[in-house]
Image (spheres, helix red, strand yellow):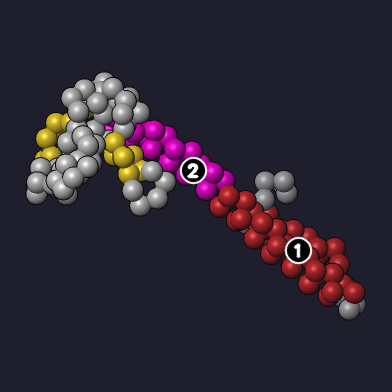
Amino acid sequence: MGEGVYSANVWRPKQGTGWKHPEGKCHASVSSGGYYSHMCGKPAKVKCSITSWGRSEGIHEFCGVHDPIRAAARKKARDEKWRAKWDLEEARRAESGRLQRLREAALAAIIQIAAGYNDARGLAQSVLDEHAATGDPTHD
C-alpha cells in the first residue's frame, strides 16, 4: 500500500472524516487485546443514535453484541451481580468482626474468673447479654 492508500477499516487520512465503515456492518471498535483495535465485522441489526462528550455523533449501526442498549442491560445485570457479592462479603466481614469482639470479651471474662472473680455466672451472662444487644439472633 502506498502513501494515503488504506483499507476500508483503517483510519482515513483525511482529517475529521472518522472511520470508514462498510454499509450494513457493525460500527463498534473492538479491542485487539492491547493498544490497537479493529472494527467488528458482524452484520448490523440495529441503528442507534450515539452521543459522545455531550455532542451527537449521528446514527450508527450495531450488531446484536455491540448494541448500546443491550450492552447497557448486560452491564446493569453484571453490576447487580457484583453488588450482591460485595454486600455478602461486607456482611461476612461485619459478622467476623462481631464474633472477634465476642471472643475478646469472653477471653477477658475467663481471665477475670481465673483471677478469682466471685460471680462467674453473672459475668458470663453480662458478656452474653452485651453480645445479644449487638444483634446475635441465636442468643435469647
- Magenta segment, which residues? 67-88
The residue that label 2 is drawn on is: 82
Identified at 28% across, 22% down, the residue is 43
Given contact means CB atoms under 8 Å apart, are the residues at marks 1 and 2 in contact? Answer: no
- The x, y position of residue 112, in whole percent, is 83, 75
At mark 2, the secondary structure is: helix
**Label 1 sits on what residue type?**
Arg
The residue that label 1 is drawn on is: 103
Can you see residue 47? no
**Label 2 sits on what residue type?**
Trp
The answer to whether residue 74 is left or right of residue 21 is: right
The answer to whether residue 91 is left or right of residue 139 is: left
Q: Is residue 85 magenta?
A: yes
Classified by dominant secondary structure, the portion drawn in magenta counts as helix
The answer to whether residue 44 is left or right of residue 3 is: right
- The x, y position of residue 134, in whole percent, is 62, 57
Eyeballing the image, is 67 above or below 88?
A: above
35 or 74, which lies in front?
Answer: 35
Crowding at label 1, few (<14), some or many (≥20) Cα neighbours within 10 Å? few
